[in-house]
């Protein structure tokens, strides 16, 4: 957790501006991620409208459906229609897409690889605040297509000028990519304090 506001709320045992978030997520620094996830994964889970019946006859085709009056009527009708058609073996069960019912919906799908790379760049910036964006990218594993300089150190020949221009562009591309990742990471971390994961609207 890189959000400083949440670090502070954990240090004060839930007292502060993010108390509501702390009530749900708790002190995430007290345990490893997998242990925390086992207890808190329900925060991101979609809620089903079907109600499980304890002790119900397995052969019974009766279903109990919870109607949430806050949801659009059209969504409720579509779900009931899909369940009815499945019961009559008309189509496989697949409820229509709807607004997330999770307490903390996933804001957007981001691959674990991209998320790791973005936060790695952020951690490197924190560890090396004076390092250039290009050098941070290299530290993070970005590879620039840098050409070797002329064999005899020429600087004014056509080949030397062309090589220098190419290498400047290669370094600029890495620097720009690094800066995009830093802007994205900053938004991810800031929006964590609002309970929005992972959210970045600008690049």
Image (tube, rainbow, N blue to C red):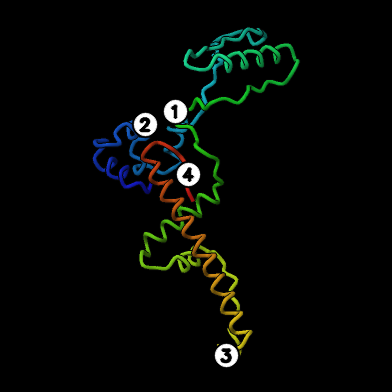
Query: Residue at image x 49%, y 14%?
Result: 68
Judged by depth in the image, the label closer to the viewer, 2 or 1, is 1
Front in this rendered view, residue 85 or 159:
159
- Dot 2, how many residues are within 10 Å of its Cα: few (below 14), some (14-19), or many (20+)? few
Residue position marked by numbered label 3 in the rendering = 154
- Identify the mark nearer the N-term, 3 or 4: 3
Query: Residue at image x 58%, y 18%?
Result: 75
Marks 3 and 2, how far apart in space?
A: 64 Å
The mark found on residue 24 in the picture is: 2
**Whole-percent x and y of residue 106?**
50, 35
Residue position marked by numbered label 1 in the rendering = 103
Which residue is farthest right?
Answer: 90
Residue 17's quadrant in the figure?
A: top left
**Whole-percent x and y of residue 93?**
68, 20
Is the residue 129 above or below the residue 95 in the image?
Answer: below
**Whole-percent x and y of residue 10?**
29, 41
Marks 4 and 1, how far apart in space?
A: 21 Å
Residue position marked by numbered label 4 in the rendering = 201
């Amino acid at each position: 957790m890189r959000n400083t506001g949440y670090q502070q709320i954990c240090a004060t045992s839930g007292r502060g501006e993010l108390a509501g978030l702390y009530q749900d997520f708790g002190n995430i620094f007290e345990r490893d991620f997998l242990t925390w996830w086992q207890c808190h994964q329900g925060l991101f889970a979609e809620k089903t409208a079907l109600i499980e019946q304890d002790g119900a006859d397995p052969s019974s085709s009766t279903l109990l459906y919870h109607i949430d009056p806050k949801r659009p009527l059209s969504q409720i009708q579509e779900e009931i229609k899909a369940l009815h058609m499945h019961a009559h073996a008309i189509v496989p069960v697949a409820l229509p897409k709807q607004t997330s019912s999770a307490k903390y919906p996933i804001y957007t799908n981001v691959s674990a690889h991209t998320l790791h790379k973005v936060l790695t760049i952020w951690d490197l910036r924190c560890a090396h605040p004076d390092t250039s964006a290009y050098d941070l990218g290299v530290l993070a594993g970005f590879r620039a297509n840098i050409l070797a300089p002329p064999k005899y150190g020429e600087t004014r020949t056509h080949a030397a000028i062309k090589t220098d221009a190419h290498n400047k562009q290669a370094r600029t591309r890495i620097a720009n990519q690094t800066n995009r990742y830093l802007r994205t990471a900053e938004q991810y971390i800031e929006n964590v304090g609002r309970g929005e994961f992972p959210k970045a609207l600008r690049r």
